[in-house]
Image: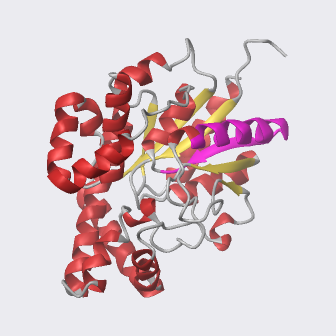
Amino acid sequence: MDASYKHPVVAVVGPTATGKTALGVELAKHFSGEVISCDSMQIYKGLDIGTAKVTPEETCGIPHHGVDILTPDKAFSVADFTAMAGKLEEEISARKKLPILVGGTGLYVQSFLYGVRFTEEKAPAGLREQLAAELAAKGGAAMYEELKQADPEAAAAIHPNNQVRVLRALEHYRATGKKLSEQKAESLPPERPYRSLILGLDFPERAVLYRRIDLRVDKMLEAGLIKEAEHVWQNRESFRTAAQAIGYKEFFPYFEQTAPLEACTEKLKQASRNYAKRQLTWFRHMDGVVWLDAGAPDAVQTAIRKTSEFLAKG
């Protein structure tokens, strides 16, 4: 085989509630593919409803990798994801199957497809504890403001309430004196490791997407989301990532008896809509995304045609 040959990889991306899972399965069935999940929360065992985790029925027998691999008390970073996905891609391609990335965590998708190389950085002793103490003393808003001054680009990509990621970005800046964007630029290889087709799903009318998000939340509640969220709340000290995740933290005031269920549910719908906007912003800044109308009757056929054309180019 030509030494310059690059494995083909297809990615299905877009905001929440656009039908990425279903399209990924259809493409996998049509092109003998296997799915690599690009969702930062679906890796966790037992967190099924709030993460909209793919069900055994929805997989239609298609292998889905990167789902249900860790207990919720374990940390999992983008560096962990790219290492895992790299091995999975090799194994899937070696089986003469098509690797299909599916998910809405833009940082995971982009870092993998762009070939970002992550190096283990050792933070100075006590820095993490110092930042935690500053957070307790000053509050989250002050720490986020500091990040905005130090690394505006990193701050723009992080929700002000996501204290874990705010502190991690500040830790990186204080430890290295470099912005995350600078590290990212330095860690990019001369050329990308894969030949990729990125299919983006969206609805032309924003109101349609928001209605689908609201309906999904209602269905999650019917499926038992409150019980799952309460489990996260009860274990919030050890389930650090899940306790910050959309779908769980919105109900904490209900369990603390400081807000009614209806208000928490509405807060979740609003948070999900805001998250969808951030996802769209991320994916629209990625180059080469082929956007499809998620509501079009021929969306699957269009995706199959685009994928056929992509694979034919070899």
Q: In which quadrant of the rendered view does residue 271 lie?
A: bottom left
Q: Nearer the viewer, residue 60 or 184?
A: 184
Q: Quadrant of the C terminus?
A: top right
**Number of marks in the rendered image:** 0
Give coordinates of residue 282: x percent, y percent. Answer: 35, 39
Residue 95 drawn in magenta? yes
Q: Nearer the viewer, residue 177 or 109?
A: 177
Q: Is residue 21 above or below residue 191?
A: below
Give coordinates of residue 92: x percent, y percent. Answer: 77, 42
Residue 256 drawn in magenta? no
Q: Is residue 204 visible?
A: no
Question: Which segment did they paint magenta?
Answer: 80-103
Give coordinates of residue 61: x percent, y percent. Answer: 75, 64
Taking the image as shown, residue 153 lies to the left or right of residue 89, namely left
Q: In which quadrant of the rendered view does residue 247 lie?
A: bottom left
Residue at x-position 70% and y-position 66%: 60
Residue at x-position 18% and y-position 54%: 137
Residue at x-position 30% and y-position 37%: 170
